[in-house]
Image (cartoon, rainbow, N blue to C red):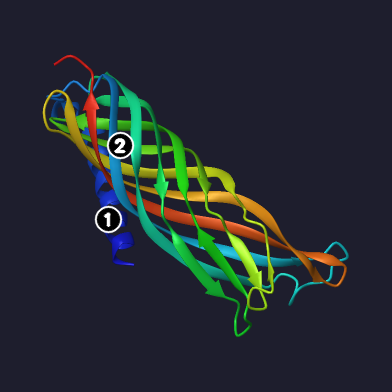
Amino acid sequence: MPVTNIMKHSILAAALTMSALCVSPAGAQSAINWNGVYVGGYAGYAWSTNEGTDIGDSAGFPWRNIGERFSNKANGFTGGVQGGFNVQRGALVWGLEADLGYLGMKGSGQWSSYPDYIGTDSSFAATLRGRLGVASHNTLFYFTGGAIVADLNNKVSLNNAQWESNFTGAQWGWTVGAGVEWALNAHWSLKTEYVYYSLGAENVATNNSCVTGDCYFKTNSTGSIVRIGLNYRFAAP
């Protein structure tokens, strides 16, 4: 996907710039005071891979084949609110950020030639992340990482939806990424950011679809979010 390649280059550029600034303190002077609490909003695009694995019923009998996998590609709009704080010491800036918003990814994937699917219909996502970066003039280059919770609503449908599983619901995982933030003045700033996430495995069950009753599937989800945001910082000029 072209967006993925663009963000990979952006992250690499941010990393190289931060490295250069760290070894050249004279070039890393910040013209903006990044200290303080901030709030804002964001909008962007998200995409993911969601996979289901046949793990069979309680007696070990599978729906198709134990260990067989099928997946989908889901994508959609994301947007919401964010807030956090920065602490600046020289050119080094660190802090904590939280966000909460709508995650509109949808997708479905068929299992080989069988009329069996895994579907995704997400609704929200929230993260709590640390940020560590280097400020240069009016620009902040940073890395970010922490925890994520997302309601992906993954579901398995078997035999043209004759049997359907429960939804996975909210899932916890980890996220890591990088971004660049530009100070427009002493209070307002604009940022662009990429984060990758991985959510823990969740099991779903389809009622009475296997030999001894419920058939179980393990789901795994990974994805990416690219977004832009606008922040208002309450620090004094």
Q: Give the answer, above or below, for where 146 lies relative to 95.
A: below
Where does the image place residue 142, in percent across and percent down from the top left?
A: 30, 36
Q: Is residue 110 left or right of residue 62?
A: left
Q: Give the answer, above or below, for where 38 lies relative to 163.
A: above
Where does the image place residue 132, in percent across and percent down from the top left?
A: 35, 31
Q: Quadrant of residue 157?
A: bottom right
Tell me which residue sits at (59%, 72%) in the image: 117
Res 9 label: 1
Q: Give the answer, above or below, for where 88 lies relative to 140.
A: above
Q: Is residue 75 left or right of residue 189?
A: right
Q: Residues within 10 Å of mark 1 (few under 14, many from 20)?
A: few
Q: Secondary structure at mark 2?
A: strand
Where does the image place residue 21, in percent across and percent down from the top left?
A: 21, 34
Q: Give the answer, above or below, for where 64 lies relative to 177.
A: below
Report which residue position mark 2 lands on.
142
The CA span between labels 2 and 1 is: 15 Å
Q: Quadrant of the N terminus?
A: bottom left
Please name the amino acid that badge 2 sits on: Tyr
Please name the amino acid that badge 1 sits on: His
Judge whether residue 15 can be spotted in this image: no
Instruction: Using the image as rendered, state which of residue 93 and residue 101 is in the foreground.
Output: 101
Instruction: Using the image as rendered, state which of residue 93 and residue 220 is in the foreground.
Output: 220
Res 213 label: none
Of label 2 and label 1, which has the lower sequence position? 1
Q: Secondary structure at mark 1?
A: helix
